[in-house]
Image (cartoon, rainbow, N blue to C red):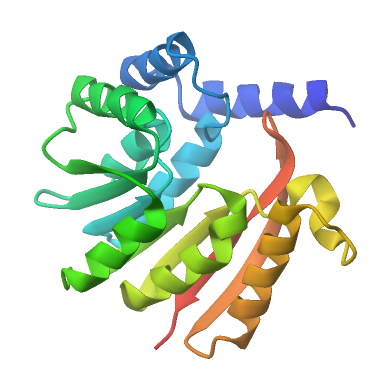
Amino acid sequence: MSQQQWTAVDEYFSEVLIGPDEALESALAAADAAGLPHINVAPNQGKLLQLLARTQGARRILEVGTLGGYSAIWLARALPAGGRLITLEIDPAHAAVATANLAHAGLADSVEVRVGPAADSLRQLAEDGVEPFDLVFIDADKPSNPLYFEWAVKLTRPGSLIVVDNVVRGGAVGDADSTDPSVVAVRRMHDLIAAEPRVTATSVQTVGTKGYDGFTLIRVEG
């Protein structure tokens, strides 16, 4: 098995089950032109997020880590009429690209891009007493994942879903002696999840266009 084969399989599934999409392709092109890193979710992963949101019947979605707005487009398209997505981005340049991409996709009225450190934005959401979110997607700086998870639990309700991306770290998550800050934080987050009686969770390894990684799926129980 090789990266080339994993990519070929992803491309096959995306071609057969997703097909061309002008708004999504434009978002990727705009992000590339702006020099954003190529760390967006793959198309089939974006479709998975959308299906989870639709299955959940999510009316309110929170995304931590906007980048160029690619995953936000997938998620916002799952919203019913009157639904709302709030996405948090620390980099003003990234946020500007995302805002333009969301507008091009016809989603400007249903998505709010908040600029600033996610920890500050999450705290502000709590202080504002926002209505609980039905789904939270965490895909930002990995060393802060434990904090983001804790805030996600506070900002959701029983029955909500939390999805955390990039948790396998190329297999390094299995190394208890790792000193990589991202690995240490991901392991710490899973310790918090395991100790949190209000949630139940599982983690899944994946291979594909984005290499060897995986995600954690969490359901808020109470």
Left or right: 157 in relation to 31: left
Residue 161, placed above or below residue 164:
below
Q: In this view, does 170 lie above or below 196?
A: above
Quarter placement of the N terminus: top right
Question: Can you say which quadrant of the picture contains the C terminus?
Answer: bottom left
Q: Pick whichever, 129 or 1, lies toward us.
A: 129
- Camera-side residue of 164 and 149: 149
Q: Position of residue 86 (x, y in %)?
A: 26, 50
Return the residue nearer the eye: 7 or 149. 149
Name the residue at 33% across, 73% down.
156
Residue plotted at (69% across, 53% down): 182
- Number of callouts in the render? 0
Can you tell which quarter of the image residue 195 is in? bottom right
Residue 5 horizontal/vertical position (percent): 80, 24
Specify whether 113 is left or right of 39.
left
| Residue lying farthest to the top in this orientation | 33
Q: Is residue 109 above or below residue 139?
A: above
Going 55% across and 86% down the picture, which residue do you hit?
196
Residue at left offset 68%, top offset 77%: 191
In front: 131, or 128? 128
Does residue 55 appear anywhere in the picture?
no
- Residue 185, image x, y percentages: 67, 62
Can residue 138 be seen in this snapshot?
Answer: yes
